[in-house]
Image: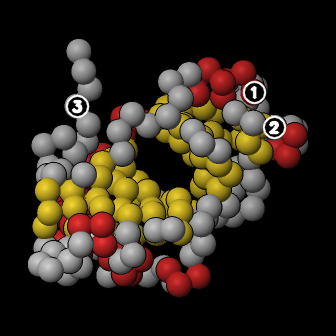
């Protein structure tokens, strides 16, 4: 049995919007991120462990708000005080996390199936996000994350790269279809490729 992704029946592939006389390589790319494990980690209030001494998949866990630690396959996003999101393409990231983060000090929850993840990439990606979110994207750097809203839908934005601008956008699965339509509608002005 195969899993049905949150945007399986919504995401369309092809070229859309104002793409006339533009190179396809200059257009935005919008895609659904699949096969991503998302783990929420919460450090208990009573825990005495020093978080600076803990590493998951070779990555430190940052106590600084909005910071992201990353390697090729795993990203750790600061989500709230004593709360992080671990995102990985590794199939065994839950086992890796449980070895490092003991259940006496941390609550570990797999939330992969409760999130829709959209990636937007391209020179105009920031402009699309500015249309629906109050964040100052001019100062939003790579390896930063933020919880915000986009047209009233709660999302998390993870800045992946600056060349070209690349963002992973997370929302609850139940809002995935509406959020997808808001993003693609906002991108029509610039033209985009659904990949």
Q: Nearer the viewer, residue 144 or 17?
A: 17
Residue 29 visible to an observer of this rendering: yes
Residue for badge 3? 4
Q: Is residue 123 left or right of residue 144?
A: left
Residue 54's label in the rendered image is 2
Looking at the figure, which quarter contains the N terminus? Answer: top left
- Image marks 1 and 2: residues in contact by CB distance under 8 Å: yes
Please say if the residues under marks 2 and 3 sit with CB atoms less than 8 Å apart: no
Name the image quarter holding residue 142: bottom right
- For this orientation, the residue located farthest to the top is 1
Does 125 sit left or right of 140 as displayed? left
Q: Is residue 181 left or right of residue 35?
A: left
User: Is 81 situated above or below 46?
Assistant: below
Q: Position of residue 178 (x, y in %)?
A: 20, 60
Compare marks 1 and 2 and give the one earlier in the sequence. Answer: 2
Q: Could you say which disc has been placed on residue 100 in the image?
A: 1
Q: Position of residue 109 (x, y in %)?
A: 54, 32
Image height of 119 relative to 86, above or below:
below
Q: Secondary structure at mark 3?
A: loop
Q: Earlier in the sequence, mark 1 or mark 3?
A: 3
Most foreground residue, 169 or 98: 169
Which residue is painted at 14% across and 52% down in the image? 12
Label 2 Cα crowd, 10 Å radius (few <14 / some 14-19 / many 20+): some
Q: Residues within 10 Å of mark 1 (few under 14, many from 20)?
A: few
Tell me how far mark 1 sits from mark 3, CA to CA. Answer: 31 Å
In terms of secondary structure, where does tag 2 sit? loop
Residue 89 x, y percent position in the rendering: 50, 34
Question: Which type of secondary structure does the marked residue at label 1 adopt?
Answer: helix
Instruction: State if disc 3 and disc 1 touch (CB < 8 Å).
Output: no
Name above or below for residue 4 compared with residue 51.
Answer: above
């Amino acid at each position: 049995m195969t899993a049905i992704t949150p945007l399986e029946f919504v995401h369309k592939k092809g070229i859309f919007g104002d793409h006339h006389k533009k190179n396809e390589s200059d257009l935005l790319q919008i895609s659904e991120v699949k096969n991503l494990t998302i783990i929420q980690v919460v450090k208990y209030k009573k825990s005495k462990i020093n978080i600076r001494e803990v590493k998951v998949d070779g990555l430190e866990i940052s106590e600084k708000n909005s910071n992201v630690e990353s390697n090729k396959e795993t990203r750790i996003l600061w989500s709230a005080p004593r709360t992080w999101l671990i995102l990985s393409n590794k199939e065994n990231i839950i086992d890796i996390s449980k070895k490092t983060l003991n259940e006496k000090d941390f609550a570990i929850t797999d939330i992969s199936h409760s999130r829709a993840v959209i990636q937007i990439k391209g020179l105009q990606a920031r402009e699309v996000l500015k249309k629906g979110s109050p964040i100052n994207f001019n100062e939003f750097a790579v390896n930063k994350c933020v919880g915000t809203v986009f047209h009233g839908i709660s999302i998390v934005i993870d800045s992946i790269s600056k060349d070209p601008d690349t963002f992973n956008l997370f929302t609850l699965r139940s809002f995935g279809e509406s959020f997808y339509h808001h993003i693609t509608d906002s991108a029509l002005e610039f033209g985009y490729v659904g990949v």
